[in-house]
Image (cartoon, rainbow, N blue to C red):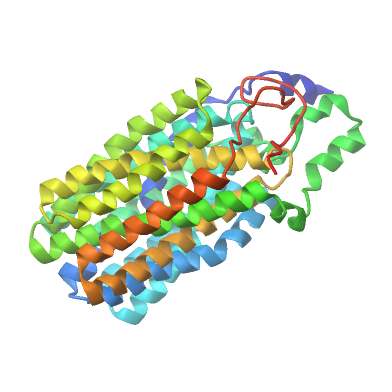
Amino acid sequence: MTSTNKNCCPRALSRWSTYGLDILNLLMADVRDGVGPFLSVYLKGGQHWGAGDIGIAMAVSSMFGAVCQIPAGLLVDGIRAKRALVAFSGLAVAAGCLSIALFPRFFLVIVSQALLGAASAIIPPALAAISLGLVGPNQFPARVSRNEGFNHAGNFAAALLAGFIGQRYGYQWIFFLVCFCAVGSIWAVALIRPQEIDHAIARGGQREAEDRTSPQQTEQLKVKPIALMDLFRRKDLVIFLVSVILFHFGNAAMLPMAGQVLAKVHPGADVSALGACIIAAQLVMVGVAAGTGWALRAGIGRRKIFMIALILLPIRGILFSLTDSPVAIVAIQLLDGVAAGIFGVISVIIASDLMRGTGRFNLAQGLVALATGLGASMSNLVAGFVVQAFGYSIGFITLATIATIALLFFAILMPETGPRTGLVADLPGTTGTVAVPTND
């Protein structure tokens, strides 16, 4: 079979597909999260909303994104038009941002946030699927590390521009910047050649088994993913998803709350200071994404790497509770650069480990994003009302406590998912039979 030779060798991409994927990750960094924490500064400093209403607005996007994650994963698994999904989602985010900028009333902001959450649910699994389908499982960890490097570089550039534009021309121009990036992402996705995407591999199919089975068996492997109930019986997957929820429950509201502190204590310097927070964190994330890729290639376990991110969260929450200095807040935010940089790479790799050969990789990406959205929505909602009742210091301490619970939960219950001695598996840099690590 001609596909056998293709499977034995690293996949060679055209330079246009490589450039397109790089540029897409660069531009989608700003689009996939909308305006992020700048929304809280816009609503607090520009529209004078209360902390509770801001918490609701921030939570709505996460909630609607969470509801759409499983359908988004199934959609990406089931269709070939993955590039069109990315482009359409970017345009929907642009429409939502324009609505918030031009009509900043409570009802319209909530509706727009719901649209942003629903549209952005498709972007992460679609980008991961395109990447996996282009490079194959052996080269996937390196590609994920590269994706995250470009993603954080894009966030750095967007934060730099947003801080400058928001301070000089007004908050609403930050929303127009997202629209510009969304339009640019359509050009980037058009550079990726669709014939180079293997859609069976893009959903976690078993290409390496092709040279060991009959054509009929191979076709069955490609088109018949495992049953959903069997997927949810995987104990390691459930533990990991709960860990993701707790990670974001303790983390998501910290930067928006820091932005509100800046808007309250240092009016006029809030946008530039928040932009500096994001810029500093994204610079760190670029290096951390590359460092995480190096650590994976050196054989350091996924579990150990993720533990570093979890340890930093409660430290960051406690430090935020002790200061309202713009310089100190920017310095503390560097810890988020390390934690988020690790999570962006390692969460995709762990999901790939757990889903190898199941045909459910993109659904697992949707589940991870669902867990992220649930954690983020609970974080913003709970933190908003805790701050309204008890103040910002207690809000940060509450998040630090939740982050400590996340650390203990993962440390006690989650096993290593990466390559282990004695496993016969198709692992990065090897060829062999396909096996999912069995830790339960």
Left or right of residue 161: residue 323: left
Q: Nearer the viewer, residue 57 or 228?
A: 228
Where does residue 179 sit, x and y in percent of width and height? 34, 56
Please state, as top left, top right, bottom left or bottom right, where the C terminus lies in the image.
Answer: top right
Please state, as top left, top right, bottom left or bottom right, where the N terminus lies in the image.
Answer: top right
In the displayed structure, would residue 431 be above or below residue 389? above
In the displayed structure, would residue 269 be above or below residue 21? below
Answer yes or no: is residue 33 visible. no
In the picture, residue 242 is in which quadrant? bottom right
Where does residue 130 sit, x and y in percent of width and height? 58, 40
Where does residue 188 sit, x and y in percent of width and height? 45, 41
Q: Residue at x 62, y 20 (%)?
A: 429
Count numbered badges in the picture.
Answer: 0
Answer yes or no: is residue 339 visible. yes
Q: Nearer the viewer, residue 369 or 89?
A: 369
Left or right of residue 280: residue 348: right
Left or right of residue 246: residue 3: right
Left or right of residue 397: residue 419: right
Where does residue 393 sit, x and y in percent of width and height? 20, 63
In the displayed structure, would residue 143 be above or below residue 40? above
